[in-house]
Amino acid sequence: MNKKDITILLVDDEPDILEIVSYNLSSEGYRVITASNGIEGVKKAKKEKPELIILDVMMPEMDGIEACEQIRKIPELKNTIITFLTARGEDYSQVAGFDAGADDYITKPIKPKVLVSKVKALLRRLKAEDAAVAEVRIGDIVINREEYKVVLKGKELILPRKEFELLSLLASKPGKVFKRGDILDAVWGNEVIVGGRTIDVHIRKLREKIGDHYLKTTKGVGYKFVE
């Protein structure tokens, strides 16, 4: 996964923190979105489905602990990494954070370079988890990434490589809308110059093979896989 394909959600009520952290992570090539309180953070997490969420603990309207609990109830975000960023160093805050479903804890103030290193370390966990998931089972479909094999209702399907990679990408995060540009980068990369029509053709071929139910179009944006 390239950095530009990784979305990081930063939730903090301090404008300076949002600005400084966003700048440093964006400079590293990550896509960064922000929210200024827990309620907004939960909404954006559900909409954007980020790979990493950095949550402040003390926030108005809904604190980080409650926001983390709410996010962990969203099925599509079960593999999202959540870490707290807070000035509070008391043990009870850390324990409460882990109990709420957080993966890690960062105490501020923290130097930008150290924060970036910490984020890279957290994302390596995600990369390791992705590599470990060689087989994806969703509904009647089984996708084996190592063998480039798709089984639908017990019957093996023969898919060309690009069709397989497109299906595997969309099925990696059911419910997430993948934008056309992101799909082109992930599936075709720099191999050849192709247009959006290429995606449409491959989607049509996949629908012919697995049915219309699984692949949905979000007009003007891209495509998503639904269970």
Image: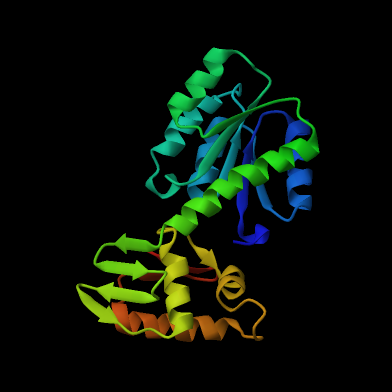
- The x and y percentages for residue 180 are 57, 72
Report if residue 122 is visible in the image: yes
Going 40% across and 59% down the picture, which residue do you hit? 174
Q: Is residue 217 left or right of residue 25?
A: left
Q: Is residue 179 above or below residue 26?
A: below
Give the quadrant of residue 175. bottom left
Residue 126 horizontal side relative to residue 207, left or right: right
Tell me if residue 150 comes above or below residue 178 in the rendering: below
Q: Where's the N terminus, which quadrant? A: bottom right
Q: Please identify the quadrant where the C terminus is shown.
A: bottom left
- Residue furthest left as drawn: 154
Residue drawn 47% across the image and 86% down it: 201
Q: Quadrant of residue 138?
A: bottom left
The residue depicted at 37 percent of the width and 46 percent of the height is: 75
> Is 182 left or right of 138, judged from the image as shown?
right
Instruction: Report x, y in % for residue 106.
Output: 65, 29
